[in-house]
Image (cartoon, grey):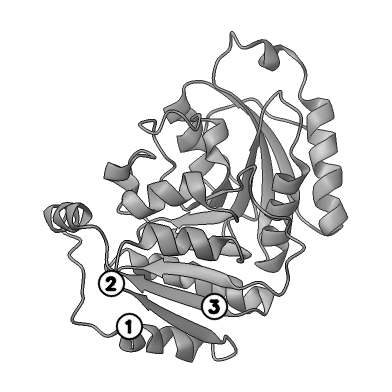
Amino acid sequence: MTSQRSTDVFTSEWSADGAVVVCIDGSPLRTDVITWAAEFAHRHSLWMRIVFVAPNTGDPNTSASPTGLFMEAIQIAESVSPDLRIRTDLISGENTAILTALTSEAALIVNPLIVTPQDDLTAPAPACSFATVGTSCQSQATADLPVVVGLDGSAYSESALAIAFKEAEAASTELVVVHAAPPEAELSRNFAAGHAPQHSTPLTWQLSGWATLYPGVTIRQIEYDGPSVAILEQLSTEARLLVVGRRGRGSFDDTALGTTSSAMVRKAHCPVIVASEA
């Protein structure tokens, strides 16, 4: 594989399918992250893009050639599926420019916090859906564990439902749907942003259309009268994936992602996908 150095928008014969983008840097590779991304790409018939990101040209990590890391990452991914379509790229520049380039063909960006460090939650988050595979996340040898999705009845939770149903079907596992009342402060922000909760719509009615599209998915509903952070964190200890929604395009903080999504990025015990607004 030949790496490319650019921040331009790339084109590819696979772009219609979208890519699972994995960000790496000069630090040792996390095999669990590469494996999770490759498994997700394989399950959903997506291609994989491994990107060496160099946001700071003065960083000593960026002075080393990424070739060895690319080859190591490719070997890990191909151990999941030898037929996985993989491309490698090297991108340098400012965080915003890097995220723009990464988003251009992405169906999902894995661990974008490598570009915008975890302690900088005001940094820009990618415009597309993204996944975090934290250091506390369990091994993905968890085929029997369910997919968990958190809903609050708002419009942007539909994107989370779409991803959750697709993953539950692809993984042949149960889908646990959690409907919890968001904090009062978050309700106020939702109204101000035009994302008013639709509490008059029963959860069963909201799910009926998705259940029709995915008849093979077993659904378990949990109604929780209180903030969703506590129940989702608890459920994440026995889940293969947690899916939550986001308000729109912004940073990793509560204002842009919402209290629940921002908290789950930091606290969940399984991989988390934060779904972009449809």
User: Which disc is residue 217 wearing?
Assistant: none
> Looking at the picture, does residue 48 appear above or below residue 61?
below
> Looking at the picture, does residue 59 appear above or below residue 238?
above
> Looking at the picture, does residue 95 appear above or below residue 78?
above
| Residue matched to label 1 | 203
Mark 1, other Cα within 10 Å: few <14 / some 14–19 / many ≥20: some
233 or 54: which is nearer to us? 233
Give the residue at x 39% y 84%. Answer: 207
Mark 2, other Cα within 10 Å: few <14 / some 14–19 / many ≥20: many
**Residue type, numbered disc 3:** Leu
Rendered image quadrant of residue 11: top right
At which x and y percent is residue 75?
Answer: 86, 44
Q: Is residue 120 visible?
A: yes
13 or 204: which is nearer to us? 204
Rendered image quadrant of residue 67: top right
13 or 192: which is nearer to us? 192
Give the residue at x 53% y 28%. Answer: 7
| Residue matched to label 2 | 153
